Amino acid sequence: MAKSTDTRRRRAATKPALTRQIVIDAALAQIDAHGVDAFNLRALADRLGVYPTAIYWHVPNKTAILAEVAAAVFRDVAPPRDGRAWRDYLRLVFHRYRESARRHPNVAPLVGAQLVGNVSIDFDFVEGILGALVDAGLAGAKLSAGYNAVFASLIGFVIQEFSPMPEDDTAQWQSAVQQRLLGVDPERHPVLAANLPLLANKAFVLRWQNGSEAPLDAAFDAFVGQVIAGVESLRDA
Amino acid sequence: MAKSTDTRRRRAATKPALTRQIVIDAALAQIDAHGVDAFNLRALADRLGVYPTAIYWHVPNKTAILAEVAAAVFRDVAPPRDGRAWRDYLRLVFHRYRESARRHPNVAPLVGAQLVGNVSIDFDFVEGILGALVDAGLAGAKLSAGYNAVFASLIGFVIQEFSPMPEDDTAQWQSAVQQRLLGVDPERHPVLAANLPLLANKAFVLRWQNGSEAPLDAAFDAFVGQVIAGVESLRDA
DNA sequence: ACCTGAACACCGTTCAAGT
DNA sequence: ACCTGAACACCGTTCAAGT
């Protein structure tokens, strides 16, 4: 209507109106609001006040947008080492990474996807981890294995903790999970049954809320400790 | 044409023709062949020799199919404990899980997705891990944290190792990754640069082939060792 | 250079109709 | 009960046209 005409006129009078960065930022906002599954170029175009096809001038396709969004969320998670001891540095990076995911939980599912080949993760991140592991005393094949282990652990936990639960029939689904837990058979699954109050909504696969609603802070702290212990054991192996 | 008519007539003469299980099996075959991204109900219907809408009689929607496919791939990864010591059992489950992913690498991306709420993973799996951790000496909050750590580690590694690389312009993408690695700046990323031959195509984010083409056997063995060491350290903490 | 506008092929899902 | 067949709304992407 009037507003849209105004916008268009103003835009024609001034500079580009759209840039790659604006597209990415809007995409992130869109995903924050409605999730990755619901993300589509027409809604994105609406948000930007342009025709869907205008986006293609700045970006090759939808996949590229998703890759850039993931990259944006995890940019600068690995600060310079400075004087930090390797354990402190690993702890720091793990917590910063998790904090980035917590701010944009709807982006978490993109971490697992290979996307446009993990261009998402920059070399600074890799260098940070590697440097810490070298200081820990790893070299050669152990350095490579240690890096893979640390990396896998980190993204595994964060994906699981923050990936959104099914958003359609949420309420119904949540009660289904709870019912399923209440129906645990103590004969077949004795340990699970005995520890149900402890695990319900706190352990992966046994939860009905994700990390933005029910964070696993203590478990994550313990987890980082385990990863560090694992690095030490690899070094001494 | 003729074949299709025959099929239809034979089908009308006999039983249901389609079952939920047949749909799931065909979906898995389809995903094995063409990947999750390319998976769609019309192609699945073609494979089954029915109209796309026939599928909806046996299954509520596409998401449910994907969830069932993931569940099928990882069914029975956790055998009974029998007399096995906890370390041996964890090693066994980890290797069986990885082996399942190796047989169906295109399914790996589904592991991260929350899907229909991890109905994919059954309680036998959870019980197996929990039992081993209890035998390791974990209880209470440590049991919960240990379980989360073990679970996150497992899926993190397997997703990363086997998730398919971008399949469109594979060749071009592979050389792009290699070029990017060759362009590493030894000033900014000294450790990475110094260890490049060691890490290239063997470390996550620095690879251009996935686990079906370039398995990370040694790294995985080391990884399992680290996870076990992590459990011990948690117990003694 | 950057955006509009029309158009295409494709896809998940609904629903009425057949048998 | 189980499948056909038509139909709808939606979506990624291409391409010609405008300015």
Image: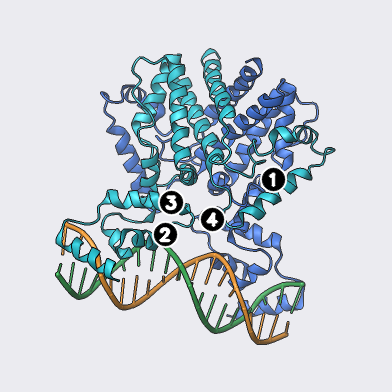
Chain colours: A cyan, B blue, C orange, D green
Question: Gap in Å between the C-alphas at discs 4 and 3?
Answer: 30 Å
Question: Gap in Å between the C-alphas at discs 1 and 3?
Answer: 32 Å
A205 over B140 or under it: above or below: below
Disc on the earlier residue, 4 or 1: 4
A74 over A46 or under it: above or below: above
The label nearer to you, 4 versus 2, is 2
B174 over B219 or under it: above or below: below
Q: What residue is disc 4 on?
A: B33
Q: What residue is disc 1 on?
A: B75
Residue A150 percent coordinates (x, y): 49, 27
Looking at the rendered image, the quarter that the C terminus of chain A falls into is top right
Q: Can the viewer see residue A139? A: no
Residue A190 percent coordinates (x, y): 80, 34
- The reply, left or right, for residue B84 in relation to residue B165 is right
Residue A42 percent coordinates (x, y): 38, 63
Chain of the residue where label 4 is placed in the rendered structure? B
Chain of the residue where label 1 is placed in the rendered structure? B
Q: Which image quarter: residue A215? A: top right
B21 over A199 or under it: above or below: below
- The reply, left or right, for residue D13 in relation to residue A181 is left
Q: What residue is disc 3 on?
A: A31
SS at mark 3 in the image:
helix
The label nearer to you, 4 versus 1, is 1
Chain of the residue where label 2 is placed in the rendered structure? A
